[in-house]
Amino acid sequence: MKLYRDEAVVLRTHKLGEADRIITLLTREHGQVRAVAKGVRRTTSKFGARLEPFGIVDVQLHLGRGLDTITQVDTLAPYGRAICADYSLYTTATAMVETAGRLTEIEREPAPQQYLLLVGALHALATRRHAASLVLDSYLLRALAVAGWAPSCYDCAQCGAEGPHRAFNPALGGALCDSCRVPGSAAPDRETVALLGALLSGDWAAADASDPRRRKEASGLVAAYLQWHLERQLRSLRMVERA
């Protein structure tokens, strides 16, 4: 039997037949994996409750031609319990796992950085370490950076002129100087651009102290930047409940 074991985040689940589910996992060493969990919808299932979205699990799988088969599951961090109890946290986490799924769409392509980034973001949500909107925007910016699309939040993304600059354009890589600015570029407040930089670098002292108006403006820029580089809209991002 071709068995393997890995840590994983449960991204989403789908019903299969009368008692089974298809589980989409982002694993630490094997990238994104889709597997069948047989009988988990029965009340007698030994590990059905362990395979809910947002949970961190230690999972053993049997390699299959199309879908793998989950044979054993142990819970490492039941973040789903705290997250699903709060609608704002739930919608935020849903946007995170959808983003992770899109950024790791090539199945079995190792993505350890994306895995660790998502685990850290879910932990911050479940423990309410920071405002949910800040955790989400920081995660989105960092996930894009790991994928090779880090935005410039200070120097000009086109010519490298030292910032800060007032213009921001998702299609051109972020901040733009007056010479490189093109029609249609946003003109966010300088505090907003500074907040983007803090979220990208992990400066939580500055992010936590930011003004609510700047957070809202930053969220709009992050959403535009994300959807430009993914070349599609995230369905869950429109449902995020922001305070």
Image (cartoon, grey):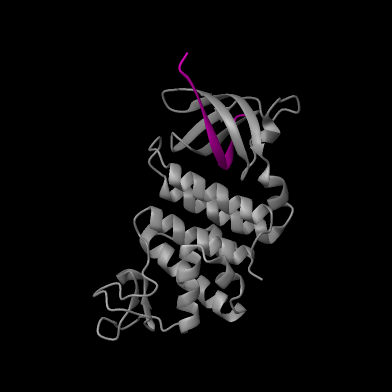
Q: How many marks are shown on the rendered structure?
A: 0
Corner quadrant of residue 73: top right
Image quadrant occupied by the C terminus = bottom right
Q: Residue at x 75, y 24 (%)?
A: 44
Residue 11 painted magenta: yes
Left or right: 156, with 37 as reference point? left
Q: Mainly helix, strand or loop, the magenta region?
A: strand
Residue 218 painted magenta: no
Nearer to the camera, 45 or 73: 73
Q: Is residue 231 visible?
A: no
Q: Measured from the top left, where is residue 178 in percent x and y?
A: 29, 86
Q: Residue at x 32, y 70 (%)?
A: 171
Q: Is residue 29 visible?
A: yes
Q: Measured from the top left, where is residue 110 in percent x and y?
A: 40, 38
User: Which residue, as the protein is rendered here, is positioned at the far bottom?
Assistant: 178
The relative height of residue 170 versus residue 61 in the rendered view (above or below) is below
Corner quadrant of residue 132: bottom right
Nearer to the camera, 62 or 14: 62
Q: Residue at x 46, y 64 (%)?
A: 200
Over which residues does the magenta segment extend?
Answer: 1-17
Left or right: 58, with 78 as reference point? left
Left or right: 175, with 239 as reference point? left
